[in-house]
Image (cartoon, helix red, strand yellow):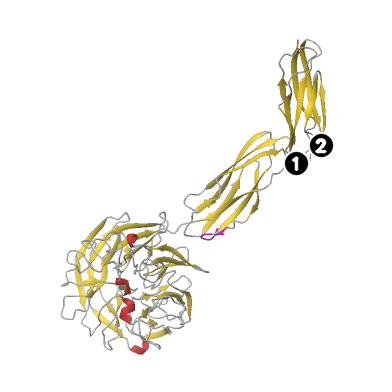
Amino acid sequence: MAKPGLIQNACIILVVCTATAIAASAQTFTTIFSFDSTNGANPSAGLIRATDGNFYGTTKKGGANGWGTVFKITPEGTITTLHSFDYTDGAYPSGRLIQAADGNFYGTTEQDGGDGDYGTVFKITPGGRLTNLHTFRYSDGAYPFGGLIQATDGKFYGTTSDGGANFNGTVFKITSGGILTTLHSFGSAEGAFPWAGLIQASDGNFYGTTLGGGAFGDGTVFQMTSGGTLTTLHSFDPYLDGYHPQAGLIQATNGNFYGTTSGDARPSCRYPLGCGTVFELTPGGVLTTLHSFDTTDGHYPIGGVIQSSDGNFYGTTSAGASWRCQTGCGTVFEITAGSTLTLHRFQSTDGAYPSGRLIQITDGAFYGTTVGGGASSSGTIFRFVVAPAVTLSSTSLPFGNQVLEQTSTAKKVTVKNSGTAPLMVKRLSIDGTFAISANTCGAVLDIGKTCALSITFTPTVLGKVAGTLTLSDDASNSPQMVLLWGTGVEPATLMPLAAAYASQVVGTTSMAKTFTLTNYQSVELTGIKISTSGDFAVSATTCTTSLAAKGRCSIDIVFAPKATGARAGKLSVSNSASNSPQASSLNGTGK
């Protein structure tokens, strides 16, 4: 497979998505805003959440002058354009904004209205007043795509993707007053063209990636001290661990670094420009590829990953996962300890080509942007909630008639996690005379997996008995309940319990009335003997000396009065049941 050039690979996100993909669950994904160019277009850098609870970001194009905007948007989707760039104060804001300790926002633009046209660093107040802090002149860097961070020393640090002493990009620091210092100019052997910004790790050093350069010419991960001393930790080999890491890094809770490459040259990749990877890198430079994309689950993960509050990693691919969208409209994915899960497949109506890093807020929801798609094909802002959901195979379970003090055959309820996050099972409870006889549901049920609960009924009283199986978990519809009911019956019954015959002429025989003997036991009823008393007699029966488990037979009884007046008798059936004999009272009148 041939590798694309740097610009071809890095700019793939500008393709317009025109078709649809498979939609995800409406309960978890919401497009909260669609740009229409007048209020901005192509938000490529992602969002931040400020101290006022609102989200802030930039659009690369659109706005009043067509050169991009800075905007504020509420969690409900009300947007305010804070600034429209007019080229004289910058154009094409690229990296994600940051909110500094002074409460203002800081960012970068790719171009500017000066002679060099190489980009700017700017400050903007929450009210929208913008100040240009620095205009690049190629000698001190060009095209600062990656945005800024504010370090522990209070100064701002960033990268330029080009320019500098060696024409391969720089690392710089800048004060809030606009004094810029070039800390390092890249040479090709140590890395070149850092498109992403930096992070400051727990050791106080800065870490980042370069799109090219290094031992194989396909990008690096580097460490740099605050004084500008740079160490190349890893050079990417396109045939082993990917190429062109366009996104920056994060440092996870385990101290290691995580990031993405935008492509890789594996023959198994189904797209000619490469599919991309997610990787882990130790501070010592040992790299592990956690996942290699293959277009069916997305490709070009240029936004990088974040570590969520659940400990897993989440990110986006800017293309792939749908044959309907040319190269695909992109995905949201999750990396767990054992697998990679596609949580959402973008379609043109809900956005296309997400390229910025996700953010997660305190309620657990993720927010992000797409470069294209939406109502006006100018990009969107979306909200994604990773949540478990429970689907039960049944919400009611009838057991029918069951012999007193005997346990029924088990009935099964299947529990499925139909949501987008592992389900945490907190508690199972059951009441009435019902019991859980078997349980394959552990403490955690993974996405798409099922488990089963087997329920039995052991009545202790005659008549209808009701109960409830309750499943408590972390799904939004918790607790889930299954209604249970059954009827407690004697081991064997004779019905009806009483019968009244019409007046009958002495010496004649009435029409027969039919009685039913039912064996509710799960074993055979044996030793059956039928007897009558009074002026009543058996005229026919299907009962023999035994009756199969759960079986029934009939007994026909006639009335033949021997005298006038009220006549009483009884039908009695003795057998092996514990409630033997079963009896029915009989009444008639002789005339």
Most foreground residue, 219 or 72: 219
Q: Amino acid at mark 2?
A: Ser
Q: Which residues are magenta?
A: 443-448
Q: Main secondary structure of the magenta part?
A: loop
Percent x, y of residue 14: 29, 71
Indicate left or right for 136 with 403 as reference: left
Question: In which quadrant is the C terminus drawn?
Answer: top right
Is residue 193 part of the magenta span, yes or no?
no
Spatial CA distance of label 2 from label 1 is 12 Å
At a point 77% along the width and 18% down the height, the residue shown is 509
Quickly name the residue at label 1. 549
Q: Residue at x 40, y 87 (%)?
A: 216
| Residue underneath mark 2 | 576
Q: Is residue 326 above or below residue 485?
A: below
Q: Is residue 45 visible?
A: yes
Residue 436 spot, x, y in % from top left: 64, 49
User: What secondary structure is marked by label 1?
Assistant: loop
Q: In this orientation, which residue lies closer to the viewer: 329 or 72?
A: 329
Q: Is residue 400 left or right of residue 312?
A: right
Asked if the stretch drawn in magenta spans residue 445, the answer is: yes
